[in-house]
Amino acid sequence: MAHSLSRSSVLPGDRHAFPTTPAPTRGAPVLHPDAPNPADVARAGSAPPLAREHLDRDAVSRPDEQRAAAFDADANARVLAVHAGRVLVVEAEAADGAPRLELRHPSTLPEPDVRCYLGRTLDAGADATGDALPAGSPIEAWTYGADASAAIAEESRWAGLRRIATSLDDRDAGLAIEAVALANWHATHAFCASCGSPTEVVSSGWARRCLAEDRLRFPRTDPAVIVVVTDDEDRVLLGSNAMWEQDRFSVLAGFVEPGESLEAAVVRELVEETGLAVDRVEYLGSQPWPFPASLMCAFRARVAHGASTVPVPDGEEILELRWFDRDGLRAALGRVALPGETSIARWMLEEWYGGPLASSMPWSTS
């Protein structure tokens, strides 16, 4: 499906698995003059927008039963408050007005519903008030319901990741994503999946224990593949999902099914939703997508040599499919909505395009 995830049926056997033989030899693709020279593209310095993190997660300290008390008494400890998938931020004093996380000392906040240990800062820095934070300062995420959140946010604001993530520095982006992902998991695991009994938070927020059977549950992540598909002319295939407004397009994506490799998921999803056979499946990178718990694994794939390049939408999840060359996509900006800047889909498109894609008809960031 285009970049809106849902689960699809399994094709019989493994007929559409990633090819194990080399793709047939063919001529070099016809590249648009604006296409970036691969030798000039330094991927190492261009991480997907939600894949940034600058934190020691300090997993070895999570089981320590004395850790929480030591945290509360630490003058350098800071808390990121979370409510309904949003985090507490303040407007920066910088000219660009970029937001920053409001990291508070635990003594300034009410008792939370759930507290999770995020880790320790790697470098010396400061919190949003300008107070110094030395390297190694511990950070927790505290989750609140509606009543407490209204009092906490009197002089601040709650903001969703889609709106602020690209404006945060690496430390704050990593903290916010980790905090929201953990809060989402706790919100749906208050009861044991096996017996229905209540569970309690243990291991500094990184597990829950069933009170009846002493069974432990740990946070899970759902892997999904997201694919930028090109043809021999280096056009890109974009799809419009049935749940979206008209003229909203993105690259194709779908969940990985049980017993399936990432590469096989790429091939299966594209066959199911576009009717196209692809090869040259190449991994590009990944980023968390905590809405609520996905890990987006990005790939590039090429329509197989000799295969049809006429896409056929499945009519259920995908209603429309279009090929775009760079000139065509540039001309369509303002008439089509592209993925938001926090998504890995936008990152993938801009890598194919060779630079930033501005649009007067942006993807919703709510």
Image (cartoon, rainbow, N blue to C red):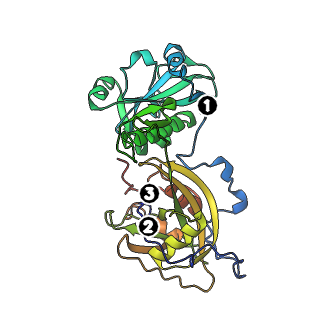
Mark on residue 339? 3
Q: Quadrant of residue 109?
A: top left
Say above or below: 62 vs 273: above
Q: Amino acid at mark 2?
A: Met
Q: Quadrant of residue 243?
A: bottom left
Q: Marks 2/1: CA distance?
A: 37 Å
Q: Quadrant of the N terminus?
A: bottom left
Q: Residue at x 49, y 27 (%)?
A: 140
Disc 2: which residue = 1
Q: Mark 2: few, some, or many residues within 10 Å (few <14, many ≥20)?
A: many
Local SS, label 1: loop
Local SS, label 3: loop
Q: Amino acid at mark 3?
A: Pro
Disc 1: which residue = 58
Q: Marks 3/1: CA distance?
A: 34 Å
Of badges 3 and 1, the one in the foreground is 1
> Which is more N-terminal, label 1 or label 3?
1
Q: Position of residue 301 (x, y in %)?
A: 59, 70
Of badges 2 and 1, the one in the foreground is 1
